[in-house]
Image: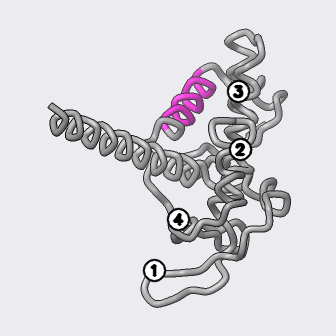
Amino acid sequence: MEIKVRIPENVNDITLGQYQRFTDVLKKDYSDYALLIRKIAIFTGLTLEQCKELTQKDLESINEDINKALQEEPKFLNRFFIGDVEFGFIPNFDKIKGKEYFDLSEYANKEEYLHNLMAILFRPILNKGIGNTYTIIDYEGTEKYANIMKLMPLGAVNGSLAFFLTLQNELSNHILKYTEAEQVKEK
């Protein structure tokens, strides 16, 4: 029997939901073989029984392709589609509202709530402006879009997290430089 397999070619072929299911599997105590077939099932859509029917050579090849996609360098992606709906990253952090900021702080660094975090950062685009500008719908909590965000490309997730990490590092560097300059002034 021939099995057709959809193997992720890059990080955007992997959804946030697949990644979260995989991280849940990693927390369990599976043998290397059981972990491998679960990993392949999650990222290809095959059943566990279908994965057990694959040759060792195919298992290794698929695993290598998945690993390559997962390790792809993140690039910031401010827009993507889920079905017919285009989602956009918060266009202006200077205008972020208190509830958005509070919820961002609440869900930050909690991998199991990554879909909630993404529902704050990415929302349906309401209007497109000149060039690459756009507005997104107002924030009303994460309930409506959190589960939908499980379908977003992992590349958009990684890119947005890298964006915040870069922002955090730049802020830390500026604070350090400012503190050093103030210490020099005092001396």
Amino acid at pointer 3: Leu
What label does residue 54 carry, if any? 3
Q: Which residues are magenta?
A: 57-68
Secondary-structure class at tag 4:
helix
Amino acid at pointer 4: Phe
* Position of residue 166 measured from the top left corner of the image (x, y, whole percent): 40, 46
Amino acid at pointer 2: Glu
The vertical placement of 26 against 145, above or below, is: above
Q: Residue at x 84, y 28 (%)?
A: 49
Q: Residue at x 79, y 58 (%)?
A: 142
Apparent side of residue 146 relative to residue 172 in the rendered image (left or right): right
Apparent side of residue 158 relative to residue 174 in the rendered image (left or right): right
* Position of residue 21 measured from the top left corner of the image (x, y, whole percent): 75, 35
Task: Please indicate, yes or no, whether residue 4 appears anywhere in the rendered image.
Answer: no
What label does residue 93 carry, if any? 4
- Disc 1 designates what residue? 132
